[in-house]
Amino acid sequence: SSDIEGDLEEILLTEEQIRDRLSELSRVIEADYAGEDLLLVGVLKGAVMVMADLARELRLRVTMDWMAVSSYGSGTESSGVVRILKDLDTDLTDRKVLIVEDIIDSGLTLSWLLANLNSRGPESVEVCALLRKPQAARVNVDVKYVGFDIPNKFVVGYGLDYAERYRNLRSVGILAPHVYG
Ligand code: PRP
Ligand code: MN
Ligand code: MG
């Protein structure tokens, strides 16, 4: 195990659990989009790992594009006011779009993103998120593909950061309080 795993209080999801779940989700996504050209939209930076693994698992013709967004406001809570740091290169007109996210926490980022992408004339926009926290239920966004519903703990790894670190952990874990306390 890598040194940085010592900063975890608990491993929530192992590399194998993540791989198995992405494999299950991929079979469902393949059935839903059989014969279609699917555009995967990854949300930088957190979604990099799940995008890379999901895309390689999918036996479908896909294209991949990326958006970078930033929510205004400080601290660990997002404000729901989002600005685009890097927009898509792809025209969404009549496209089938699948947003790929690492985690839905408050749901505010995703809620804004869905409205934004839906305004561009796509045929459909759905969401695949590896992780979902309980408070995401408070915003009314329909997430079609969810990897794991997790408790409201500070999680890092597999793309998820604390102060830009821990994204390269292969597992998802709960950050030990001594790291940020
Ligand atoms: C994190 C995470 C999601 C979003 C979820 O991204 O990757 O994109 O927050 O939060 P929400 O549901 O409360 O809106 P972050 O803004 O930290 O940027 P990052 O992906 O670059 O880490
Ligand atoms: Mn993110
Ligand atoms: Mg982050």
Image (spheres, rainbow, N blue to C red):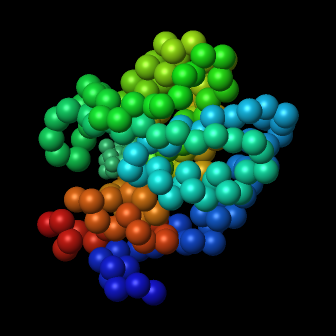
Which residue lies most toward the front here? 89
Where is residue 100 shown, x and y percent of the image? Answer: 54, 42
Instruction: Quadrant for residue 60, please give it.
Output: top right
In percent of the image, x 41 and y 51: which residue is there? 46
User: In this orientation, which residue lies closer to the viewer: 84 or 10?
Assistant: 84
The residue positioned 57% from the left and 56% from the top of the image is 52
Q: Residue 167: which quarter of the image?
A: bottom left
State whether residue 143 appears in this view: yes
Quadrant containing ligand 1 = top left
Q: Is residue 110 left or right of residue 97?
A: left
As displayed, is residue 84 above or below residue 149? Answer: above
Frontmost residue, 109 versus 65:
65
Check the picture and name the quadrant holding the N terminus: bottom left
Q: Is residue 34 left or right of residue 146?
A: right
User: Who's the residue at 57% across and 71% down the image?
Assistant: 15
Q: Quadrant where the C terminus lies?
A: bottom left
Q: Position of residue 80 (x, y in %)?
A: 29, 28
- Using residue 105 as the reference point, say whether residue 85 is left or right of it: left
Please state the horizontal and vertical placement of residue 43, each as a whole percent of the image.
Answer: 44, 42
Figure label count: 0
